[in-house]
Image (cartoon, rainbow, N blue to C red):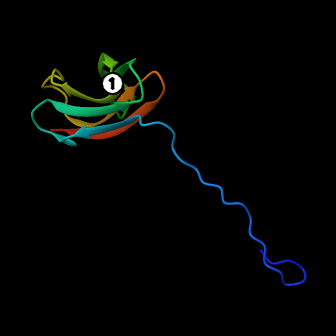
Amino acid sequence: MSGPEGQVTYSNVVSFQKGGVDELKVYPSVVTSQQFTMNVASERQQQGTVQVIDYAGRVVYKKALTLNAGSNSITVNDLGSSLKGNYLVVANTGSARFTNKIVIQ
């Protein structure tokens, strides 16, 4: 910023950072074998759920999870062969909610 007499002043720098290490990764994003794997990172041991939701908002799959501190690899392999189309994978932990997209063929 420049003052009335031409002097230069600087404002404080403010930075924002996403807190915690919770996150969700889902692969493959195009599901052909009626199963997918999700990696959920958690700061602490906690209970959670995974849901597969269609774009109309219907929950077509739900499972309770026990997450350990650190990285958790969960294979979802009981989707059923009748599911085809675009879906959202939603992981709810005790401290956060994460969403990722998948296509089931």
Quarter-wise, where is residue 66 in the image? top left
Residue at the spot x=66%, y=60% of the render? 13
**Residue 50, relative to residue 20: is it above or below?**
above
Between 60 and 28, which is closer to the camera in this rendering?
Answer: 28
Q: Identify the secondary structure beneath mark 1.
A: strand
Quarter of the image with the N terminus is bottom right
Going by the numbered disc 1, the residue's amino acid type is Gln
Of residues 59 and 75, the one nearer the viewer is 75
Q: What's the residue at 48%, 25% (across, down)? A: 95
Q: Which residue is mark 1?
A: 51
Image position, residue 36 (x, y; %)? 18, 33
Q: Residue at x 16, y 20 (%)?
A: 78
Question: Where residue 44 sits in the image (x, y, percent)?
Answer: 41, 24
User: In the depicted view, which residue is nearer to us: 40 or 87?
Assistant: 40
Q: Where is residue 15 drawn, in percent x and y?
A: 60, 54
Quarter location, residue 53: top left
Q: Is residue 70 left or right of residue 30?
A: right
Q: Residue at x 74, y 69 (%)?
A: 10
Say if 48 sits above or below 98 in the image: above
